[in-house]
Image (cartoon, rainbow, N blue to C red):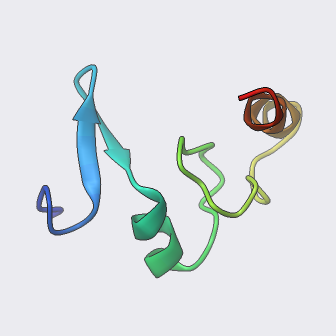
Amino acid sequence: MLVKGKDFYYNEDGLMVLTEQYHRERGFCCGNGCKHCPYKYVNVREPKRSELLKKIEHG
């Protein structure tokens, strides 16, 4: 079970959002298109991956 503040997540609009630090410590992209993925969504299937990368480029 994750513990808020300890396991690097926060709540946003009722959803648990994992931080970039959490993902880095896990060590890989899970393929779910996480908001703070530091791995450029390498395991996310197309066309979702391209859409997420465009969001990053355009801020």
Q: Is residue 30 above or below residue 12?
A: below
Q: Residue furthest front?
A: 59
Q: Position of residue 49 (x, y in %)?
A: 81, 40
Image-quadrant location for residue 29: bottom right
The residue positioned 11% from the left and 61% from the top of the image is 3
Q: Is residue 53 above or below residue 19?
A: above
Total labels drawn: 0
Left or right of 54 in this view: 34: left
Image-quadrant location for residue 14: top left
The residue positioned 76% from the left and 55% from the top of the image is 40
Image-quadrant location for residue 43: bottom right
Q: Position of residue 10 (x, y in %)?
A: 24, 44
The residue positioned 66% from the left and 53% from the top of the image is 31
Left or right of 6 in this view: 26: right
Q: Position of residue 37 (x, y in %)?
A: 60, 54
Q: Position of residue 58 (x, y in %)?
A: 80, 26
Point out the image quarter for the N terminus.
Answer: bottom left
Left or right of 16 in this view: 55: right
